[in-house]
Image (cartoon, grey):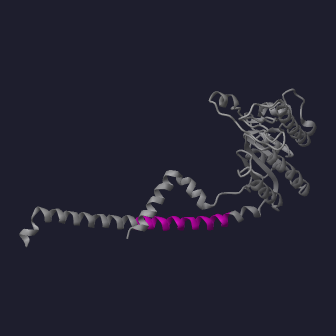
Amino acid sequence: MNEQLNTPEWQVIGKLVASIQDEQRRSRRWGIFFKSLFFIFIFSILIMVFFDNDADTKPLSQSHVAVVNVFGPIMAGAPASTEHLLPSLENAFAAPNAKAVVLNINSPGGSPVQAGIIFDELQRLKQAHPEKPLYAIIGDVGASGAYYIAAAADLIYADKASTVGSIGVIGSGFGFDQLMAKVGVERRTYTAGGNKDFLDPFLPQKENHKVMFQQLLDEVHQQFISQVELGRGDRLVPHKDLYSGAVFHGARAVELGLIDGLGSLHSVSRDQIGVAHIVFYSPEKTPFQAVIDELGVQTKTAISWGLNKGLMMQ
């Protein structure tokens, strides 16, 4: 029997069995490792939620500056949208120990509709809470719709190199009708209503549509100008480029009356408002979302793979 076990065939079988046993042991170790990692991860999140919630209640009991971030494009579904900003602004103005509300702006603008709604709501909140001044602090950029929102503030500050202004409206697109003609593609459009094909990029531009669209832009532009003048009043200095869509650096914006002075969030809170303590009222990511974002796409993929592999290995 021993001689039979020493044959090359049995030796190969023995090595194969040993290899399978080693693989099973490694699989069990990896399974235990990833299961442990999973539970540590969940436990860490629970701790973060507990301490984060506990920490958030403390600053609200003392005097502070209530800050709402207006970051990124102003558009539906984005962080700088009515659905995200308005609840935060309501909470900031309603906070009993908030001595002032600050719009912390870093945005190139976006939808005039979203900006207009936020502007109107800010006017309402200012009337409802006259004891709380509203400041706007512009970081890198506060242009177009972002400046529209800033104009609702009692006072606007920016850095000397901030990009400010762009009081204008733009609408753009492409025309593919000549390209389609060259490649022999015919566009067939059927409408009920002479303007239903308005701005169709696959049809030649109609002169009356061009006039209509320009009129639309001009009227929205005038709405923008009216709101800026409502907010800034006689602080604005007449200038040929003021409403041309031009942008200005912060120092020039002070000269034109677009902003009231130079400063940052912390310097204005400390020196102008007189309260150094800052509390952010903007919606924040959950601890789970924050951890996932920090881990990054590659790490998330690796953890998901590892958890799945670990849970399948017994």
Q: Depth check: give the residue in front, 24 or 139.
A: 24
| Magenta-drawn stretch, dominant element (helix, strand or loop) | helix
Q: Depth check: give the residue in front, 1 or 282.
A: 1
Which residue in the rendered view is the most extreme toward the left? 3
**In the picture provided, is 18 more to the left or to the right than 184?**
left
- Specify the quadrant of the image occupied by residue 282: bottom right
- Up the image or down, 101 lies above or below 251; here it is below
The total of numbered circles placed on residues is: 0
Q: Depth check: give the residue in front, 67 or 309.
A: 309
Q: Which quadrant would the C terminus be assigned to in this image? A: bottom left
- Magenta span contains residue 265: no
Say which residue appears at 66% left-offset and 66% top-offset.
53
- Specify the quadrant of the image occupied by residue 44: bottom right
Q: Which residues are magenta?
A: 32-55
Say which residue appears at 85% left-offset and 53% top-offset.
121
- Specify the quadrant of the image occupied by residue 11: bottom left
**In the picture provided, is 55 more to the left or to the right than 81?**
left
Task: Please provide percent x and percent y for residue 190.
Answer: 76, 42
**In the picture provided, is 88 more to the left or to the right than 20?**
right
Task: Please provide percent x and percent y for residue 307.
Answer: 45, 63
Q: Which quadrant would the N terminus be assigned to in this image? A: bottom left
Task: Please provide percent x and percent y for residue 17.
Answer: 22, 66
Which residue in the rendered view is the most extreme toward the right? 234
Task: Please provide percent x and percent y for residue 130.
Answer: 91, 55
Say which residue appears at 22% left-offset and 63% top-offset.
16
**In the picture provided, is 254 more to the left or to the right than 163?**
right
- Up the image or down, 125 lies above or below 209; here it is below
- Up the image or down, 136 lies above or below 169; here it is below
